[in-house]
Amino acid sequence: MHSTKRLDSTFAALADPTRRAILGRLARGEKTVTALVRSFRMSQPAISQHLKVLENAGLISTTVRAQERPRRLETRPLMEATDWIERNRKLWEGKYKQLDRLLEELKLEETK
């Protein structure tokens, strides 16, 4: 998946509080759909819908183990999102520092 498209999918998936909560549970270890249904007190189709969005975004994967298909957290898309946020945070911090310097210069000129 193209990195911009994956980033869009990651942020769209993270926009929902239930999906973020599912990722939080999966961060503690693999879970089956049945375990997630019990944990959230939601219907199986509702949980499956959330899992589909998370899987399409690459945030989770499914392991086939006998009759079970536990889901597990995939951290790469989260790391990519974190890197993007950090790059933009640094960019905007630099812009704010430039603005602060300009405002200080204007204040000095104003007092002269």
Image: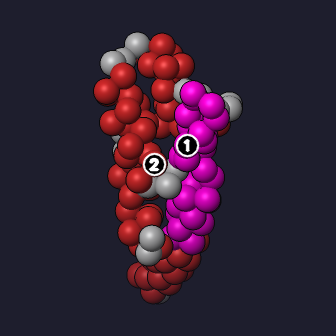
* Three-letter code for the amino acid on which mark 2 is drawn: Glu
Dot 1 corresponds to which residue? 62
Q: How far across and down, in percent of the image, does residue 17 sit? A: 40, 34
Magenta stretch holds residue 63:
yes
Q: How many marks?
A: 2
Q: Residue at x 38, y 33 (%)?
A: 48
Task: Report the side of 46 relative to 24 (left or right).
Answer: left
Mark number displayed over residue 55: 2
The colour scheme used to paint the residues is secondary structure
Magenta stretch holds residue 90:
no
Q: Is residue 46 above or below residue 40?
A: below
Earlier-in-chain disc, 2 versus 1: 2
Q: How far across and down, in percent of the image, does residue 32 sit? A: 55, 27
* Three-letter code for the amino acid on which mark 1 is drawn: Thr
Question: Label 2: how many residues lie within 10 Å, few (<14), some (14-19) or many (20+)?
Answer: many
Q: Is residue 35 above or below residue 112?
A: above
Q: How far across and down, in percent of the image, does residue 49 sit? A: 33, 36
- From this viewpoint, which residue is outermost toward the front? 66
Alpha-carbon span between mark 2 and mark 1: 8 Å
Q: How far across and down, in percent of the image, does residue 20 sit? A: 47, 37
Asked whether residue 110 appears in the rendered view, the answer is yes
Q: Is residue 109 above or below residue 94?
A: below
- From this viewpoint, which residue is outermost toward the right? 28
